[in-house]
Image: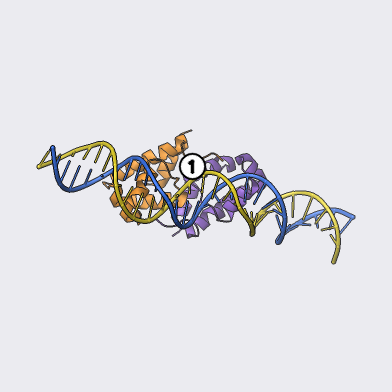
Chain colours: A orange, B purple, C yellow, D blue
Amino acid sequence: MVKTLGTARHKALIALLIEKRETAGLTQVELASRLGEYQSFVARLESGQRRVDVVEFLELASILEFEPDAILSRLLKVH
Amino acid sequence: MVKTLGTARHKALIALLIEKRETAGLTQVELASRLGEYQSFVARLESGQRRVDVVEFLELASILEFEPDAILSRLLKVH
DNA sequence: AAACGAATATCTGAATTTAAGATAACTTAT
DNA sequence: ATAAGTTATCTTAAATTCAGATATTCGTTT
């Protein structure tokens, strides 16, 4: 199994997550607060230093109000 | 952010992953081999002791030939 | 029913990730 | 130029994950 961090797909994923947070008009502090985490948690995530698991991804989708399937489909095209 | 391990969604996810592996007619040893991992890796994963990140999930979908979107949609319904 | 082989589960340090919390480094507006 | 808001980085402790071995479970065959 490929090491997730640093892969093209992981980079694409976090780029999309950042985009979605910004579209939602949230700062890292605000998102962190809704997640019950520190701002540095979001920063680590968005700088690609931490993996995002499937369950977390769904939680992010719910908070940031994006369609997880849609994002996944876009990631599928990244190799 | 909720601790993934032990959540209903994570349990549902691994149940589906096991189902998909079995449908594909693969043993843990065979899946592990295709992943370039040990059998104990697959066992840990399938016993819910290890998180599955989004990128890994897509890799599993490719090997086990399932539609990641479809699985994700089913997980969405689990709370 | 005992024994065998195939499949899965569990254990144990060691290595790697992740987290908390603080602080530093941008940004942008005044 | 400064202040406020935002994001990035650092450190050390804590938690996860891994390799590899071993144990257990489950079917089959005799």
In this figure, which residue is indicated by the disc labeled 1? B55
Drawn side of residue A18 relative to residue B54, left or right: left
Residue B13 image point, x, y percent: 52, 53
Tag 1: residue type?
Val
Residue depicted at 52% across the width and 40% down the height? A3
Chain label for disc 1: B
Q: Nearer the viewer, residue B62 or B4?
A: B4
Dot 1: few (<14), some (14–19), or many (≥20) neighbours within 10 Å?
many
> Where residue C19 sits in the image (x, y, percent)?
41, 53
User: Is C6 displayed left or right of D30 in the figure?
Assistant: left
Whether residue B53 is situated above or below residue A76 in the rendered picture: below
- The picture places residue B46, in percent across and down from the top left corner, at 58, 53
B48 sits to left or right of D25: left
Q: Classify the position of the N terminus of chain A by image quarter.
A: top right
Closer to us: A42 or B35 = A42
Which element type, helix, strand or loop, lies under badge 1?
helix
Where is residue C2 drawn, in percent x and y? Answer: 86, 62
Up/down of B24 relative to B10, above or below: above
Residue at point 35%, 48% (across, down) = A40
Q: Is residue A9 visible?
A: yes
To which quarter of the image does residue B34 belong? top right
